[in-house]
Amino acid sequence: MIRLWCVQILGVLRLEVRKTFLARRGLWIYLLALAPVLLFAGQSIYAPRRQARLARIAREHPVSRWALLFTRPGVTREDVEKRLGEPYFKQTQIRWFRGTRVRRDVYRYTDGQTDEALVFFDGKLVRIFRSNPRTLADDNTIFATIFQFYYLRLAVFFGCVGVFTNLFRGEMVDKSLHFYLLTPMRREVLLAGKFLAGLIATVVIFSCGTALQLGAMLWQFRGPALTDYLHGPGWGDVAAYLGVTGLACCAYGSVFLAAGLLWSNPIVPAAVVLIWESANVFVPAALKKLSMIYYLQAMCPVVAEPESDMSLPLRLLLSATEPPGVRVALVGIVALIIAVLLIAAVRARKLEINYSTD
């Protein structure tokens, strides 16, 4: 009997995987998965070119790094020119403010690494804008933020909505599900085959997207920095991000597979889940444990924090809580997946097709 079930699952799996990967209406899922790759690839191309440009400018207009770092607001333009020399960029504007003529000068200096813009008003330095080259640690933080606030909450979420809700509900709309139900196959076996097909499709698509993002991000750090990172926590971080992506596909997929069985319009429960997952940072600590993103974030190598420049009212609404351990988070996600799939199996066993109402 178990052998027969495995053969039936493999048959459903082969058919459904092919349908999922080749569906024209599912091409938008690939765009969701690959959109951040373009962002990191663009940064990896731009950053080395920018540093090469600054290095060339520094050779043509040499500036002492310490003199540049110890320049403070309040000094005059003449003192800056005497200390730092001629800037590589200079801009002068005359403005009128409340009937008073104000001269604004912008000088730019670089030591090959740091790029500084000095702003003068009437010959007095008032502001310094300093741009430092991004390090691997900086890009790791940026990647963690994009991964947790865009990739998990939006890309993987909507990808699973598009794939898993159509496994049953889509065939009800297309009036083709009865071909499965007329076969001598247990409904639980059909459910398992469809779930595994959707899981394989989403895991392959979004795990490849995660791997390409990491590769594009690390490409600009070729050399000792990248070697030290990979010999240290690097490969562990890569495995953790790929594992979290797979778990997110499994967790959200089980929920939306059940939604396609339980509701005639699964978009409504999907919208409710989206709002709940998005509001996770604002709900009390006890309610956070009812959210999947709470456990998925805890398993990421770097937990992204809210932006430091967030407005005070929003910051007051934030609910700080200690994230669970990796083992606790993993057990919580697996328990949720099993519970939802059991509910879906019970509903599938009682499934009846009436195309006049569905």
Image (cartoon, helix red, strand yellow):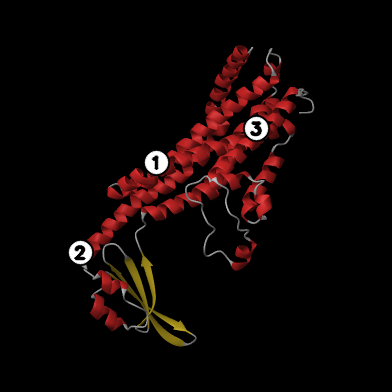
Q: Which residue is mark 3?
A: 338
Q: Callout 3: helix, strand or loop?
A: helix
Give the crowd class for mark 1: few <14, some 14-19, many >=20 residues within 10 Å. few
Residue 259 at x, y percent in the picture: 70, 35
Reply above or below: 253 against 186.
below
Disc 1 marks which amino acid? Trp
Alpha carbon distance from label 3 to label 2: 63 Å
Residue 299 at x, y percent in the picture: 52, 44
Residue 317 left/right relative to 303: right
Residue 217 left/right relative to 35: left
Give the crowd class for mark 3: few <14, some 14-19, many >=20 residues within 10 Å. few
Q: Quadrant of the N terminus?
A: top right
Reading the chain from its start, which is encountered first: label 3 or label 2? 2
Alpha carbon distance from label 1 to label 2: 38 Å
Name the residue located 56 percent from the left edge and 64 percent from the top edge: 310
Name the residue located 61 percent from the left edge and 27 percent from the top edge: 195
Q: Callout 1: helix, strand or loop?
A: helix
Q: Quadrant of residue 248?
A: top right
Reading the chain from its start, which is encountered first: label 1 or label 2? 2
Nearer to us in this view, 325 or 204? 325
Alpha carbon distance from label 3 to label 1: 29 Å
* Label of residue 59 in the image: 2
Name the residue located 70 percent from the left edge and 17 percent from the top edge: 181
Disc 2 marks which amino acid? Arg
Q: Callout 2: helix, strand or loop?
A: helix
Q: Which residue is mark 1?
A: 235
Residue 93 at x, y percent in the picture: 37, 77
Nearer to us in this view, 159 or 249? 249
Nearer to us in this view, 121 or 83? 83
Q: Quadrant of the C terminus?
A: top right
- Which is more foreground, mark 3 or mark 2? 3
